[in-house]
Image: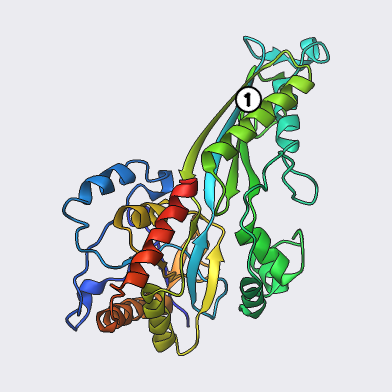
Amino acid sequence: MIGFIRYSPLIGHHPQPILCQCAIELPVNVRFLIDGSEETGSELIPELLRELRKDFLVGVDFVAISDNYWLNMDTPCLTYGLRGVIYFYVYVDGSSRVLHSGTHGGAVQNPLVDLEALMCSLVSTNGTILVPGAYSCVRRPTEAELRNFETLDFDPATYAKQIGTDALYSNDKVELLRRRWLLPAVEFHGIEKSFDRIGAPTLIPKSVMGKFSLRIVPDQNPYLMSERFKCYLHQMHYRRCSGNRLRVKSFIDGRAFLADHTCVNYRAAYKALEEVWKKKPDLTRDGATIAMACTLEETTNRDVVLIPMGECQDFQHEARERMSVRNYINGIKVFVSYLCNLSAAIIEDSEDEDMRQEDRDRWRKRFW
């Protein structure tokens, strides 16, 4: 029998390993940063961390985050890359009041029709983003990285079955992972004020608001991408010759992240996963966004490692979100082993390490 832990809204969807219940003394000092605003973009955390540089973060040598998931159900993962996200609200305002379609239909331009046309203009039928410049500055994967994708414990047919769909854009393993991890993506999330309740309304809305997100990848500037999408939407609306008014709002909910998985921090985590799970972990990226990853690396100037605990079928962000007891117990063991490995590692306080950190800092500032 496989047991599962159900998540409480008060705990969040990523319960952390309870290291304080370990029966051994930890060989390193540990400082916890618990972010209760992760689902709303951690907006105030960067300002807080800049203040904590003066005391709480002084002397920090390594940073670890456990906030994402395995690629599968059986093989542990170590994650070195994340996409960023920009969220958009698209408002189309029409008449000053709701109108009856029997009386006014065919005589006025419907805001909902304008909104649907704008949303559909963003993406082609094969999932390609149609906004000019949407793929500019996308970092090209190395041949070694693509070869690694081929070896990962991931099967497109199994993936389709797990999420219950026959509508994948590709059945090729590497191509699917590229789409999920290495390329920007636009996804639509809903329309407000559109009479979407049960029934058969015959009204023309006076105003509607559509919601979509843009996932961006390393090297893409989130501010530039946001402006490109806003300009594109205004151009498309102008071409429609609509008398309805368009407003577009956006906010950056997290930046793209890419780590150096050859550093001491990652090697310690890799060894810990292998020791506990008795198999080599997969080195993966993740298409999701963890705003804290970039913020912590920037404020500490230290490498950040991402150690996922949950399986791919833990129904993240859904009402039935869970974690297997097996993964929770082994997750505690992984973190204890990871901390022991760090204590035994030689901190690379050499001239070469200083140069590596300077290169990382220049890379971050190029698009942050």
Q: Position of residue 183 (x, y in %)?
A: 65, 55
Q: Is residue 224 left or right of residue 323?
A: right
Q: Is residue 165 left or right of residue 254?
A: right
- Residue 284 appears in view: yes
Q: Which residue lies at the image location 72% right of the left edge and 25% below the top edge?
A: 235
What is the quadrant of residue 198 in the picture? Answer: top right
For label 1, count other residues whose C-alpha is less than 10 Å away and answer few (under 14), some (14-19) or many (20+): many
Q: Is residue 316 left or right of residue 356?
A: right
**Vertical arrangement, residue 352 with respect to residue 246, above or below:** below
Q: Position of residue 15 (x, y in %)?
A: 35, 64
Q: Position of residue 298 (x, y in %)?
A: 36, 53
**Secondary structure of the residue carrying numbered label 1:** strand
Q: Which residue lies at the image location 27% right of the left edge and 49% below the top edge?
A: 49
**Vertical arrangement, residue 164 with respect to residue 226, above or below:** below
Q: Position of residue 2 (x, y in %)?
A: 47, 80
Q: Residue furthest bottom?
A: 278
Task: State the residue position of label 1.
Answer: 208
Amino acid type, callout 1: Val
- Residue 112 appears in view: no
Q: Is residue 21 left or right of residue 190?
A: left
